[in-house]
Amino acid sequence: MKILFSMFLLAAALVLTGADWKMSDFQFRFKTDRADAIYNAGDEVCFSGNVLVKGKHPEKMTVRCQVIRDGYKVLQSQKIQLTENPITFSAKFDRPGWIRLLVEVLDEQGKVLRIGNRQVQGGVGAMADPEKILPGAAEPADFDAFWAAKRAELDKVPVKALRVPFAPENGKYFNCWDIKVDCAGGRPVSGYLCIPKGAKPKSLPVAVRFHGAGVRSANAVLYYRGLIVLDVNAHGIENGKDAAFYSDLQKKDLNNYHAQNKLDRHKGYFVGMFMRVMRALDYVKTLPEWDGKTLIVFGGSQGGAQSLAAAALDKDVTHCIAGVPALCDQGGVLAERSAGWPQFVSWFRIGKMTEEDRAVLPEVAYVDCAYMARRIKAKTYIGTGFMDYVCAPTSVFAAYNNIPAGTEKDIVTTPDKAHNAPNTKGMKWLADFSAQVFKSQGKE
């Protein structure tokens, strides 16, 4: 009996500490009382659902449930022991915005359970009148003049590229190069260019892929056989190095790069990044194989921000695919909403901003993609998740709604997804378009 009791205690400890669990063991099955989770101001939203572990209702497991408005304000918070009965909460929208139910599994110390470096959490979100959400701060009056000056600075540097051939694994259908393109701002464009073998002059569309946050090499993009693809690393750094090289850069020169020179609109880190975005487009337009018609940009998070900036700053861009785009609505904090990453003024400063907080907002406004969006003419596909606290859906809609009337655009919303929310329509269009081009070339 003593041995059995000890085994029971060990099993209970495993349930509470997560020792042997995988993230896939946990299913957060929550929904709102409207399938699309879209409401109007004044409506009440009802959340309901439960947490399953390995497909079953767990015993002796506690969760903390929080109802959070606009990314920062906790409206309700309660600890609940899981049973077969559904968890239910309700809240009222008092204005256009975002409310989410965050459900966190707790360990035996009452802290959020972690598996590796990830917290075990899920839930579902909802929005009211998302089409009415606009940037929380006024756009700089000299926004266009600022970027015209940067364009002029860039134009003083000839579009000159160093191309070094390489043969990636599974790259038999492509000719590939590690490229460096001269650029203003102190760093080159750095990436991997892949062109389908046998491509004739003026025969193929071009797609440029931009990276999310972090420090890493470019990648050889080999799954769009109907397209020329340039994959651009975000920092103008060397490609193809070992993991230690990029880890060292992230700890040193590129540590907290997003905050570098944030109080100087001319030297802020993303100004240089967006100049590299423009130069990447300059370069691909010189490729003799480009058809001269179709220029696609795509990426997620920070890569989504770069895609929006690309479409805004280069009128030759025809299609923009931006998943969970970052750098949107930094002034959202002035409207009591969480900004998108990197949140130059964090949500916990809402209502108690410092002098530096107020000083930084006008400086970073020039890289705010909610303002970039107002200059987009390309067909644009955007994706957002209503559980995304990294790039809040309000920040994404502030950009989406700023895309001019008459411009083709589409947005995919996923109520129960966070920063992994898919841009299903955009990515499907890209895959289908590449396949059509490939087929039109008489290839199978």
Image (spheres, helix red, strand yellow):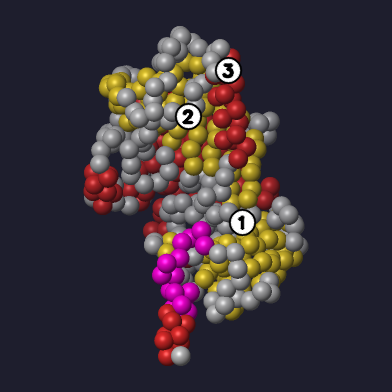
56 with respect to 257 (left or right): right
Q: Main secondary structure of the magenta part?
A: helix
How many residues crowd mark 2 within 10 Å: few (<14), some (14–19), many (20+)?
some
State the residue at coordinates (50%, 34%). 298
Q: CA distance from mark 2 to mark 3?
A: 14 Å
Numbered label attached to residue 439:
3
Give yes or no for residue 286 being in the magenta stretch. Answer: no
Q: Residue at x 55, y 64 (%)?
A: 54
Above or below 233: residue 341: below
**Of residues 109 and 69, which is closer to you in this image?**
109
- Which residue is label 2 attached to? 223
The magenta region covers 11-25
The mark that comes first in sequence, 1 or 2, is: 2
Q: Quadrant of the C terminus?
A: top right
Residue depth check, mark 1 versus mark 3: number of the one nearer the observer: 3
> Helix or strand or loop: what does disc 2 sit on?
loop
| Residue 377 seen in this snapshot | no
